[in-house]
Amino acid sequence: MPTFYDFVIVVLSLGLFKFVGDLISARRQNNPPIPPGPTRYPFVGSFLSIPTSTPWKTYVRWSQEHNSDLVAVRAFGQVSIIVNTKKAAKELFERRSAVYADRPQMMMADLMGWGVATTLSPYSDQWRAQRKILHHSLNATASATYHPMHLAKVELVLRSLYLDPEAYLGHIRHYAASMAMLIAYGYDVDPKEDRLVDVAEKAVNMISNAMFPGAMAVNAVPMRSSSHLCILSPPRLILSTLDVVRHLPDWFPGTGFKQYAKQCMALTTEMWEAPFAFAKRSIAEGTAPPSLASAHIEMNDARGGGAHGEKMIKYALGTLFSAAADTTVSAITTGILGLTVYPAVLLRAQAELDRVVGRRRLPTFKDRPSLPYITALCREILRWQVILPLALAHCPTKDDVYEGMFIPKGSPVLLNAWAILHDPEDYPDPEAFKPERFLTADGTLNDDEVQAAFGLGRRNCVGMHMGNDSVWITMASIISIFNISKAKDEHGNEIPVEAVSTDEAVSHPVPFQCSIRPRDSEAEELLQQLGRDTM
Ligand code: HEM
């Protein structure tokens, strides 16, 4: 990881451009004021106030202090805007979606090999081509065709939890990775150790760390505009700065980040290429199982899409794995955390399952309409510990004004999904894990599908149906078979569990211990039956 020295060098070099930045922003003097925010000092602006830990909470506080839906951080001439209310988020990301469909481009993401991913691509033909492939493969109807795969993989999760409950996180990781790899490439993941999964997980971790505020000073150098970590604005000027920084030799002080980027680039290259090469090889050998890769390669060949079309498929499917696996793991782990800390929720969920499904079989997707409490529980998981608390940064393609506040073209605009999903007006007692908040008085589901957890507007999550399916079937199945509670130490005392999540772009519960045991002999019998069927 880069050192503090890297940080100082990059910040100082950015400062050199402050004067020119001011000149350019003077052009905008006639515009309304930017949204309020923390005190801005000469030269650094509000750089020193940018929070590095749970920033989403600090942004809510600023929003309340200034009585404003939007707050802004201004540092070294660059403005980043944070959208903290549902009203403003709907207006900007949904009603003005054509303006807010772009992503800020980070030099660091590009150096790490992530610039081609659907998630981080600018609003461009490349993004449209990849989004079309993913939408075709992940819309509600397509996602329903993966239900049998979910059921088979969830049985493996249950069996693994039975045999080795302490390693629950590994079992969940295996489930999420194997679903994504199977759907995308027809590739069956090795449960013990799998090179392709290992590589992709490491690459995802590296970008998730690099995108978090304060994690990587070089994020301060944007490529085309910037992200909320990226601190300077005038694009052309920055490009020249970027060229200097990017091409400095590795021994040059302050360029430690390049090593980090190089390590990641090796991983991302393998992540894009290796599984796709596997799919192509199996097509050529006539052994390819049905997968998105084989379907899209066939369609691309039929329409003469050539090498460019194939590249789009490769990046779209590589993105599928990287976007699906980590988020799904975080959601399911959050569910286990919620049940560990709130035992009454587990009992109510088990009662519903017992009434509707009984004890002699596992729940299936067909039971979903009759299990509103389980669905409410899954919504509460996504609301309670928001998985991407600040979603992914958008940026406007032209200058804009919201309620008298100026939003400069190209500035990173962040959806504070955490703020929206923890607004006490909509979610009283927001820190508590209460699935019933999604039920009406007569016990049916209300119409709040926690959209903000999946982002809003044209760049919202294209995999939300598959994400919801994964969380729902895994939670329903685990709850129907296991009791989950706090683990005990060697003296029989409960080990306390704190519901805290990590400071990353994709936030995960901080590792915690829990006890996962079959509910009773009936559950154990069912588990043994699964063992016989799946061995
Ligand atoms: C519970 C699980 C998931 C959560 C909470 C989640 C959340 C999100 C969020 C917040 C965004 C950013 C939206 C924005 O910028 O406004 C996003 C984007 C995205 N997600 Fe998900 N996601 C989940 C699962 C998945 C799955 C399973 C897939 C694929 C199978 C997927 C694929 C994507 C892609 C490709 C994007 C980028 C969209 C774009 O930039 O056009 N996600 N997701």
Image (cartoon, rainbow, N blue to C red):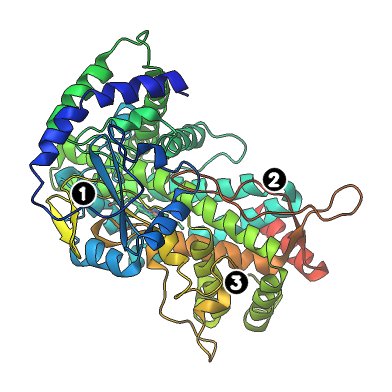
Residue 167 image label: 2
Between marks 3 and 2 in the image, the one whose residue lies nearer the viewer = 2
Q: Is residue 357 left or right of residue 65?
A: right
Q: Can residue 318 be seen in this view?
A: yes
Q: Residue 141 in the image: state x and y as whole percent.
A: 34, 67
Give the structural element (helix, strand or loop) at label 3: loop
Q: Which residue is drawn at 31% across and 9% down?
A: 249
Amino acid beneath label 2:
Ala
Q: Residue at x 20, y 55 (%)?
A: 100
Nearer the observer, 271 or 338: 338
Nearer the observer, 11 or 223: 11
Q: Which residue is drawn at 58% across and 57% down?
A: 334
Residue pointed to by mark 1: 102
Name which of mark 3 and mark 2 comes first in the sequence: 2
Name which of mark 1 and mark 2 comes first in the sequence: 1
Q: In this view, does 164 lie to the left or right of 469?
A: right
Q: Which residue is drawn at 39% across and 52% down?
A: 390
Amino acid beneath label 3:
Pro
Residue pointed to by mark 3: 363
Give the structural element (helix, strand or loop) at label 2: helix
Q: How crowded is mark 1: few (under 14 residues within 10 Å), some or many (20 or more)?
A: many
- Which image quadrant is residue 266 in? top left
Which residue sits furthest bottom? 442
Q: How far apart are marks 1 and 2 (CA)?
A: 40 Å
Q: Is residue 23 left or right of residue 65?
A: left
Nearer the observer, 368 or 75: 75
Q: Residue 263 in the image: state x and y as whole percent.
A: 42, 22
Q: How far apart are marks 3 and 2 (CA)?
A: 23 Å
